[in-house]
Amino acid sequence: MSAGQEAREPGEDRAGEYVLGTLTLAERVAFARDLARDPALAQAVRDWERRLGPLSLVAPEIRPGPHVWERIARALPGGAAANDNRVRALTRRLRLWQGGAAAAALAAAGLALVILSPRPERPDGARYVAVVTSGGAAPALLVSIDTATGQAAVRPVAAETPAGHSLQLWYVGTDAVPKPLGLIGADAARLPLPAGARAGEGVFAVSVEPPGGSPTGLPTGPVVYTGKLIRE
Amino acid sequence: MRDDATLERLLDAVAARDEAALRALYDLTAPKLLGVILRIQRDRSAAEDILQDVFLRVWQSAGSYVPEAGRPLSWLCTIARNRAIDAIRRRTEAQGPVHEDGEDWLERLADPHDSEDSILGRDALRACLARLDPAHRDCVVLAYCEGFSREDLAQRFERPVNTIKTWLHRALASLKGCLEAVS
């Protein structure tokens, strides 16, 4: 069956099969993209989740091993560096979740921000990086920092921009004031870094903004991804 | 207690970056979510990876919970199911042998062991599932509860994939009509 035929299938059937889980991977990814842009589709999905939900709640309870919580706790902002409240401060400032539906759709698409800090002493030759995420979810972005040139190479992988919005990348340094780095487009880009980020410190965050970016110079929309540099 | 009000309060606190609230939410709901995930991803270690991912996702997006999205536990189950389905659809190798069939999950719907579930919604779903053609019903239940793909169902019912797709669409249309008539 061609992609064209799939596209003409009624939204109701696609929404039902999305919730059932029987769409193929390609159909599922395409549907998740449409979902972020089509409120009627999102409503159809919520309706199916509500109708079939009782079948989820009858699942037996199975206690996870203690290592699961330990891994979650380590991954929280306070897990690695207890005093690092920069993301917290940033997020508090952004508690106006005007794009709640869009943010939920992004979360559902299976994304994460991954930041790599490559060693500058190996400038030439192709390098390959495998980002291993649980469940095989693709990361939203790869951000690699070139400490020699003070630039960040931003490569979108699975980041999805909600319709009528832009995604903007921020750097939050020790002063806790977010600094705009640039907009995230469909293609890889190189963005200049503020001084502190060159040392590999601080937090990177991606927020949903009006088209063209935040009009105020500070994030105005929900933060959908955050990440820290991981030294290679 | 795992009532809606408690879970909503915890989600609000998690949205305000309260790690203790995330832990409390985890203690109350992780066993149920792992149960949901393990029906679909039967490898325990992979299922626990998904559970970890679900809670990190909740940490990031608890602020997007709104009561219109359903009851808090249902919202969490939906995230867990979606992550589990995403994971198995991305994988190419076959799942291990199946140990339950659709009939068992239907029986569990009739068993009033889950007080937090609305009796009304559950009874309506059970009644409407019971009206479906048995093979169509099993397709719906095996897909939803155990993550069967159309190909898995085609193999199980020895029918072409397109027939399975037709069955699923028919079953969904009947279910929707029936549930709307009941409510």
Image (cartoon, rainbow, N blue to C red):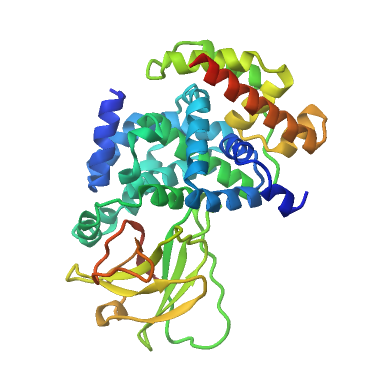
- Quarter the N terminus of chain B occupies: top left
Q: How many numbered marks have been drawn onto this rendered protein structure?
A: 0
Q: Is residue A9 left or right of residue A195?
A: right
Q: Quadrant of residue B101?
A: top right
Expressed as whole percent of the image width and height from the top left, the position of residue B123 reads 50, 13
Expressed as whole percent of the image width and height from the top left, the position of residue A98 reads 31, 51
Can you see residue A63? Answer: no
* Up/down of A94 relative to B3, above or below: below
Expressed as whole percent of the image width and height from the top left, the position of residue A35 reads 51, 48
* Up/down of A35 relative to B33, above or below: below
Expressed as whole percent of the image width and height from the top left, the position of residue A227 reads 36, 63
Tell me which residue sits at (38%, 88%) in the image: A149
Can you see residue A172? Answer: yes
Q: Which of these two is toward me, A9 or A161?
A: A9
Q: Which of these two is toward me, A42 or B135?
A: A42
Q: Which of these two is toward me, B87 or B61?
A: B61
Tell me which residue sits at (50%, 48%) in the image: A38
Q: Quadrant of residue B135?
A: top right
Q: Is residue B115 left or right of residue B149?
A: left
Q: Quadrant of residue B115?
A: top left
* Up/down of B11 relative to A1, above or below: above
Tell me which residue sits at (31%, 69%) in the image: A170
Q: Which of these two is toward me, B136 or B20?
A: B136
Tell me which residue sits at (23%, 71%) in the image: A173
